[in-house]
């Protein structure tokens, strides 16, 4: 079934149910008649009375939608208040006369002045009630539509921002990896070929997996491991890397390339001229929570000359976390002595 048609049909059904309930209230709330009392001889024909009541109901329904769909849109919202008030008063007069004439003719009540005098206050009260309902309906409906449009606009803006942030990850990452390849080529290292194979697997992941909104945590972990292996081929025994990736207790999904900037940052700033350079990386997923920790040592006294792209990785991932896992993550970054550590917890969807 076409979804828009289904929604439109559901709205029509809800409106019909609301009108039926509203016009049934006088009957439902009417006190029970005393069965011992004989029927009054002047009781009018029930069928004619029913027809007159339904005709009056149709007039009220027509005024409700006329005000909400035409008068408020064409006049009130365009600040043509005087014309709006005049037309509403005109609707009051037309409804009062038509409803009175129909009741008079169908119920065979010929007392013109007496019936009209009684009918005007009642008709005015009913019309004021329907007018208030119409204004409230139009106001609430417009507010819902406005909020929906604002929400859709915000979502589109967030999607655009996330796409831009994700697109920034790949060039930044590739820049660092290609620098590694250049270093191996200069050394004419035998590790260049396996490094290129690792790089091709990483590029395959970035091309075919990161286009999805979510990837499995297992694939993201494999990607991290491939990156770490690629870096170890470059540094060899100059760097100690302790990796502990525990098997998740369930199947989880995560935004692609969300964790790599932390690892990349550790290799960038936790190596160099330091003695006994060491990086510790742990990852586990338990009870719908991801625990990810990266620790590396660094020299706070070193004055490293940074390029223009320095720091884009961490700033990028922090913004992505704010957008994707609002109130569902905790990120702690600390520097103590010669140790830089990152601790991240994320509430994951199953």
Image: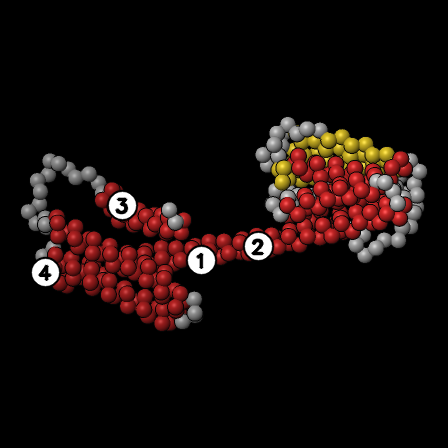
Residue to which mark 4 is pinned: 110
Mark 1 vs mark 3: in front: 1
Mark 1 vs mark 4: in front: 1
Residue 12 horizontal side relative to residue 327, left or right: left
- Of the numbered discs 3 and 4, the one sitting upstream in the chain is 3
Residue 284 horizontal side relative to residue 92, left or right: right
Residue drawn 80% across the image and 49% down it = 178
Give the answer, above or below, for where 198 lies relative to 87.
above
Residue drawn 74% across the image and 52% down it = 171
Q: For numbered disc 2, what is the local secondary structure?
A: helix
Q: CA distance from mark 4 to mark 2?
A: 65 Å
Residue to which mark 3 is pinned: 25
What numbered label is drawn on residue 156?
A: 2
Give the answer, above or below, for where 84 lies relative to 39.
below
Residue 94 horizontal side relative to residue 67, left or right: left
Residue to which mark 1 is pinned: 142
- Of the numbered discs 2 and 3, the one sitting upstream in the chain is 3
Mark 2 vs 3: CB contact within 8 A? no
Q: For numbered disc 3, what is the local secondary structure?
A: helix
Residue drawn 82% across the image and 47% down it = 181
Q: CA distance from mark 3 to mark 4?
A: 28 Å
> Residue 167, position in %: x, y?
68, 52
> Residue 199, position in %: x, y?
75, 44
> Residue 136, position in %: x, y?
40, 56
Quarter where residue 107 is shown: bottom left
- Of the numbered discs 4 and 2, the one sitting upstream in the chain is 4
């Amino acid at each position: 079934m076409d979804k828009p048609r289904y929604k439109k049909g559901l709205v029509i059904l809800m409106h019909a149910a609301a009108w039926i309930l509203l016009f049934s209230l006088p009957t439902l709330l009417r006190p029970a008649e005393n069965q011992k009392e004989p029927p009054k001889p002047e009781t009018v024909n029930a069928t004619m009375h029913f027809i007159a009541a339904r005709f009056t109901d149709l007039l009220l329904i027509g005024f409700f939608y006329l005000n909400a769909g035409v008068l408020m849109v064409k006049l009130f919202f365009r600040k043509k208040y005087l014309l709006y008030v005049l037309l509403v008063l005109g609707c009051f007069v037309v409804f009062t006369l038509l409803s009175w004439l129909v009741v008079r003719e169908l119920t065979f009540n010929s007392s013109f002045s007496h019936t009209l005098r009684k009918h005007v206050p009642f008709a005015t009260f009913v019309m004021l009630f329907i007018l208030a309902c119409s204004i409230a309906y139009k106001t609430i409906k417009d507010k819902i539509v406005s909020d929906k449009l604002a929400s859709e606009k915000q979502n589109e803006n967030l999607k655009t921002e996330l796409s831009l942030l994700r697109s920034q990850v790949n060039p930044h990452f590739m820049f660092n990896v290609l620098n590694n390849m250049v270093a191996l080529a200069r050394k004419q290292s035998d590790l260049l070929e396996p490094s290129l194979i690792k790089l091709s697997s990483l590029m395959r992941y970035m091309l075919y997996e990161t286009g999805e909104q979510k990837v499995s945590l297992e694939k993201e972990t494999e990607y991290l491991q491939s990156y770490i292996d690629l870096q170890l081929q470059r540094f060899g025994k100059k760097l100690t890397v302790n990796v502990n990736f525990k098997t998740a207790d369930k199947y989880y999904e995560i935004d692609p390339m969300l964790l790599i900037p932390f690892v990349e940052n550790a290799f960038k700033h936790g190596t160099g001229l330091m003695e006994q350079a060491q990086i510790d990386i742990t990852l586990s997923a338990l009870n719908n929570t991801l625990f990810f920790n990266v620790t590396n040592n660094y020299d706070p006294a070193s004055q490293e000359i940074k390029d223009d792209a320095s720091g884009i990785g961490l700033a990028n991932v922090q913004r992505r976390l704010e957008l994707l896992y609002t109130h569902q993550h905790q990120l702690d970054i600390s520097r103590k002595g010669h140790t830089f550590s990152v601790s991240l917890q994320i509430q994951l969807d199953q």
